[in-house]
Image (cartoon, helix red, strand yellow):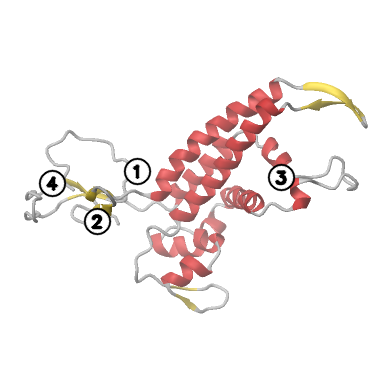
Amino acid sequence: MPKSGKPAHRRDPRRRAETTLESALPAVGSAPAHGVGSRVVLAIQASVPGIGPVTFTVPSAAHLLLTITSQRAREADAGRLRVFRKLRLVAGPGGREALLGEQDLFPFLQAAMAAIILGYTALDNFTTESLPSDFSITHPKTHKVLSLDAIEQGTGIDLRLSTVMAALTGRPNLRSSEPDLWARCTRLIELRVALGHLKAAEALPDPSAPVKPPHSVWADLLGIQSYETEVVDVVRSVMRHYATPEPPPGVASA
């Protein structure tokens, strides 16, 4: 898809691939020829029922998801402020305690859950959408060679965020080189697992538990002071860590 003849623009990260031509591109079908220096983006064609063939820029799922994650994180942060700004004290077993109103609590929880699930999914896509079809790697523990299918379907996201991405990009392994970021990333993954497989003990804790109040995933969500920091910034930092240099002219970034 040509972008030549248009003013210089800031690269949209939601595009799957964008580059500058080093050599001329001949005309193909109805598409005109383009000279050296033309800015082009990767495009695909799809058939839509009732409409027919359509052509569009290939999107990056990871960056599209990150955009939505940021929107939900801002909603969660604003919602959390409303929840704790309207505390109502009521009589409890140990004296007066704060009661959170459903009117503000439930919208906050919805936004918080969405931010975590979408942020995790953005990370998940980030680890797979750039892998070339012939990519393989040796598992650091089993020493077995893992094909692309095995990496995408048979490995956990923690291995893909560490060994696989380091091998793919040539960047330092996130797990060992940035332990603080890795810990925050692991926490995001744990919250996603808890929300995706919510157990009765987490959703409705045992009131007879020795720890008062008993732990729950809802307490974890309420305890995050900034979803922008602990979800969006984590995903962005991981992406920046494994960022590769802009490809030279004529080399596609896909």
Task: Say which of marks 3 and 1 sits in front.
Answer: 3
The residue carrying pointer 2 sits among few (fewer than 14), some (14 to 19) or many (20 or more) residues within 10 Å by Cα, namely some
Element on which disc 1 rests: loop
Lower sequence index among marks 3 and 2: 3
Q: Three-letter amino acid code at disc 4? A: Gly
Task: Say which of marks 1 and 4 sits in front.
Answer: 1
Q: CA distance from mark 3 to mark 2?
A: 43 Å
Rendered image: mark on residue 27? none
Rendered image: mark on residue 217? 3
Q: CA distance from mark 2 to mark 1?
A: 14 Å
- 61 over 114 or under it: above or below: below
> On the image, numbered disc 2 is attached to which residue?
252
Does residue 96 appear left or right of residue 199 in this picture? right
- Residue 194 position, x and y percent, is 67, 51
Q: CA distance from mark 3 to mark 1?
A: 33 Å
> Going 17% across and 42% down the picture, which residue do you hit?
3
Q: Three-letter amino acid code at disc 2? A: Ala
Lower sequence index among marks 4 and 3: 4
> On the image, numbered disc 4 is attached to which residue?
37
- 203 over 167 or under it: above or below: above
- Residue 187 position, x and y percent, is 63, 49
Task: Say which of marks 3 and 2 sits in front.
Answer: 3
- 229 over 82 or under it: above or below: below
Element on which disc 2 rests: loop
Lower sequence index among marks 4 and 2: 4
Q: CA distance from mark 1 to mark 4?
A: 20 Å
The residue carrying pointer 1 sits among few (fewer than 14), some (14 to 19) or many (20 or more) residues within 10 Å by Cα, namely some
> On the image, numbered disc 1 is attached to which residue?
13
